Image (spheres, helix red, strand yellow):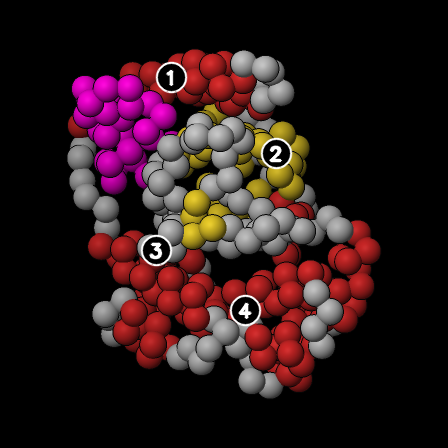
Amino acid sequence: MGKLPTMRSDNSEILPYNFKDYFVFIGTEKLSDHPNFCMFNHWHDETEIIVPLKGHMTYNINGDLIKLSPGKGVFVNSNQIHYGFSDDSTDCVFIYALWHPMVLCATNEIENEYVNPITKNASIPYLRLDADTPWQKTILSDVSKMYEQLSDRAAPLMLQSRIFDIWHTIYVNTKQERKVTSSASPQLSILKDMLSLIHNGYGEKVTLNKIADAGKISISNCNVIFKKYLKESPIKYLLNYRLMKSTELLVENALPITEVAFEVGFSNPSYFIDAFKKAYGLTPNEYRKKFRASETFDPYADI
């Protein structure tokens, strides 16, 4: 089991970087590390590139669904709401590479001229990367090489060089996109406020009214925003989030099932057991036995 992610006050994720004081996070992951082959949505200051190695998945970025497979990756810009999932319960193995924009900001001029025009441009929430397009193929290849270089003694130097190469490639190939500058949709900010309420208060009584109030919007608009960006209702999202949080308690400690149910916000243990089995195909006890034995499940793996 992985450790719980550290969150900022705005509920964005703080990543466990590979090297001390070097804000880069690279690794590999399997979609099957997550309940039902589905990550939970997250956002962070870092930009992110996903490079599938085997299998396929769908990546949701601000409500847009991107199909990923070997040769087809994606660049996700800073602070976009995103997560990956499988449509058919099959696995996907992929490389992830994330770095904080400040890694690129050697001078104020570089930051203002070459970094901010991309990271702060809401018209570029993401870029599809297809190996059939030469410059995009170069980025996919560079990310794979970055992963291979992690064990090198001078890895930070080598990674820094490739990060600048990748950023230069993105910069020179997004001239048209950078001509259209826009601010982030207010709906995304509202959604983050509502998600923060759920992520921080799932163990308490959370109602649809409370979720809508967190975004300072009506219940009807709350439903519209959740379905637009996350493809499910607020109450369905709350249920799934509570179930996901329960998997950690089941695997990492010996709390009775009733206490697990109460801990994640269910007032009726029987309803918790029924909902859990419907979601995961196992009772909570069966799930605990299976994943405690395998020690392969990590619901809090990043990206």
Residue in the foreground of this view, choosing between 165 and 135: 165
Around disc 3, counting alpha carbons within 10 Å, would you say few (fewer than 14), some (14 to 19), or many (20 or more)?
few
| Residue 246: assigned label | none
Q: Which residue is mark 4?
A: 242
In the image, residue 196 sits, relative to residue 154, either above or below, namely below
Dot 1: what SS? Answer: helix
Residue 140, percent across and down? Answer: 50, 22
Q: Is 296 included in the stretch rendered in magenta?
A: no
Find the magenta span and give its range. 101-127
Q: Earlier in the sequence, mark 3 or mark 4?
A: 3
- How far apart are labels 2 and 3 at the CA level? 28 Å
Amino acid carrying mark 3 in the image = Ser
What amino acid type should be assigned to the residue bearing mark 2? Thr
**Which amino acid type is marked by label 1?**
Phe
Label 3, on which residue? 9
Occupied quadrant, residue 121: top left
Looking at the image, tell me whether mark 1 or mark 3 is earlier in sequence order.
3
Q: Residue at image x 52%, y 71%?
A: 239
Is residue 164 rendered to the left or right of residue 92?
left
Residue 222, position in %: x, y? Answer: 31, 69
Q: Is residue 123 magenta?
A: yes
Residue 174 appears in the rendering: no
Q: N-terminal of the two: label 2 or label 4?
A: 2
Q: Are marks 2 and 4 in contact (CB under 8 Å)?
A: no
Whole-percent x and y of residue 64? 40, 47
> What SS does tag 4 mark?
helix
Closer to the N terminus: mark 4 or mark 1? 1
Q: Which residue does the numbered mark 2 point to in the structure image?
A: 28
The CA span between labels 4 and 1 is 40 Å
